[in-house]
Amino acid sequence: MADESATPPVPRLEVRNLTKTFAGVAVLENASLTIAPGEVHALVGQNGSGKSTLIKLISGVYSADPGGEILLDGEHIGPPIKAKALHGQGLSFVHQDLGLVPDLSVRDNVRVGRHAVNPITRRIRTSEDAVAVGETLKYLHTDIAPSAKVSTLLPSERVAVAVARALQDRTPGTGVVVFDESSRAIPHEALPAFYDMIRLLTSQGTAVLFVSHNLKEVLEIADRATVLRNGRVVETGIPTAGLDEAELTGLVLGRAAELGDIMETLPPAPRPETVEFVDVSGGRVEGVSAAIRRGEVVGFTGTVDSGLSDLGPLLGGDRRGTGKVKLGGRVVDLARARVVDLLDAGIAFIPADRHDKGVALELTVEENATLPHLRSRGKPWWTGFKWQRAETEGIIERFDIRPPNPTMPVAAMSGGNQQKVLLGKWLLGTPDLLVLDDPTQAVDVGARHAILTASRQAAADGSAVMVCSAEVEDLAAICDRVLILQDGRIVREMTRPFDADTVLSAIFTVDDAAHALLSAPTPASEA
Ligand SMILES: Nc1ncnc2c1ncn2[C@@H]1O[C@H](COP(=O)(O)OP(=O)(O)OP(=O)(O)O)[C@@H](O)[C@H]1O
């Protein structure tokens, strides 16, 4: 029987009643959670539920409204949080993009801001830095040379460098590391090493706060979870051991998840006309040719160095390359076409880097959502506004954009909601070719389903849809075919039936025999 008189262990991190208000609106209200030493604690919630706000309060980027408290090992550390003192106090952060500078050495990336310095000359003591970095890397069971340039490292090694920066100068087993959507930046092949590293940290006593939209991953790696909804903690410290994905999805969305089978609702219906790309090259992509039928969704996938991240931008005019796209009797020369030419030809591209390239932050939701359709919906002498409001409201409802306000500047929305606005504006048109690059990054489980359904619906409405993604679950959920890239070329074609596991293993088991290049722009084989 448990000894009821025993004092409960002091939490490693305790957040008590944190509130944050912007312009009179509370975006986080009385948020509390505790994390024990050695625990992986997940923070989950829909886009706009307040996760980033909570992390920014803990990291001192935002100052909390009066009243709350943050404690580390029982010691009050804020508010106010002194951001510069946090690392020394035991709290460090690994952000979404890992925050590494590829052209700098491992040593400089780890030590940036914390260099050993000669007190008299103020010169950096590089050898002292290298020894310190080497020790931290050894603790993480890696033997990366501190002098190596980060750009030469494998993805799993880059993760180790980011974690080493978070851990340096710490006694092993102490402190808290916050991983803020970090796994999204980590390619499939490096994820097992990442999870092993987290387990190594927690096995020694370090606590981990793990923010993620990937609920499968949360169930795999986290011991307990806290769920935010509309700025409030609705569940905290629930053990993940007793949960399944549907239950956790229900907690995140606040309703029973109706994530039906998209292929069943919108079954394959390829049309005879095709969109073809011929000999597309640029970046790591070398001479890719393929054909997509209207009505068809074709996935492109591969490892991080396969050329996958270059293919979408080449076709969308975001990266200069060569090759041709043939659609509806037109031939677009990618070497010459400007973005406006591609749009005129009926090619819509939704970039992966949506924050920088896709959305006009200073404009409202309505302006962003309807801008590309002004010409097609309006009359030459009058564009009107009712259709704009009606379409924007449709997008808001369909993608569950929060807050549901068409006149809100996009800059004031959470990252995931900004993504939804951009996706909504293109997905609700019917371009001849729709190119989606990593469409579900940073969006919550409900929006992911809405985006995948809308992609499939765009095909049903007559678009040829191309999805470039490393998210094998997404590809299995909506694609008629999947083409696998390796070394910039298509090396394998998969037709249904397939599932996420078969696609994933195909990415990693492409053998030399499969290198018979699918060079001819042949339409779907079942035609
Ligand atoms: N600087 C700001 N000014 C006004 N409102 C803001 C600001 N930053 C965030 N918000 C609002 O706070 C709410 C919570 O946003 P937050 O970024 O914390 O959500 P999130 O859970 O991290 O979402 P996501 O998963 O999309 O990143 C949102 O409604 C957002 O519009």
Image (cartoon, helix red, strand yellow):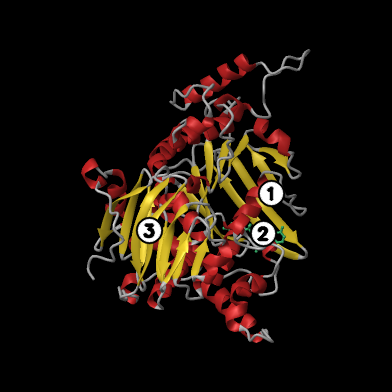
Q: Secondary structure at mark 2?
A: strand
Helix or strand or loop: what does disc 3 sit on? strand
Mark yes or no: residue 249 visible. yes
Q: In the depicted view, which residue is nearer to us: 328 or 492?
A: 328
Label 2 or label 1, whichever comes before in sequence order: 2
Q: Do labels 1 and 3 touch, CB within 8 Å? A: no
Where residue 259 sits in the image (x, y, percent)? Answer: 40, 69
Q: Is residue 440 above or below residue 406?
A: above
Taking the image as four quarters, which one is ligand 1 found in?
bottom right
Q: Is mark 2 within 8 Å of ligand 1?
A: yes
Q: Which residue sits at x=63%, y=81%?
A: 388
Q: Nearer the viewer, residue 378 or 105?
A: 378
Judge by depth and name the residue closer to the eye, 246 or 316. Answer: 316
Estimate the spatial distance between the alpha carbons at disc 1 and disc 3, rounded to whole Å.
50 Å
Circle 1 is placed at which residue position?
Answer: 57
State the separation of the CA atoms marked 2 and 3.
51 Å
Checking the image for residue 278, the label placed there is 3
Residue occupying image coordinates x 62% and y 78%: 374
Numbered tag placed on residue 28 in the rendering: 2
Q: Is residue 266 above or below residue 207?
A: below
Mark 1 residue type: Leu
Dot 1 falls on a residue whose secondary structure is helix
Q: Residue at x 54, y 59 (%)?
A: 45
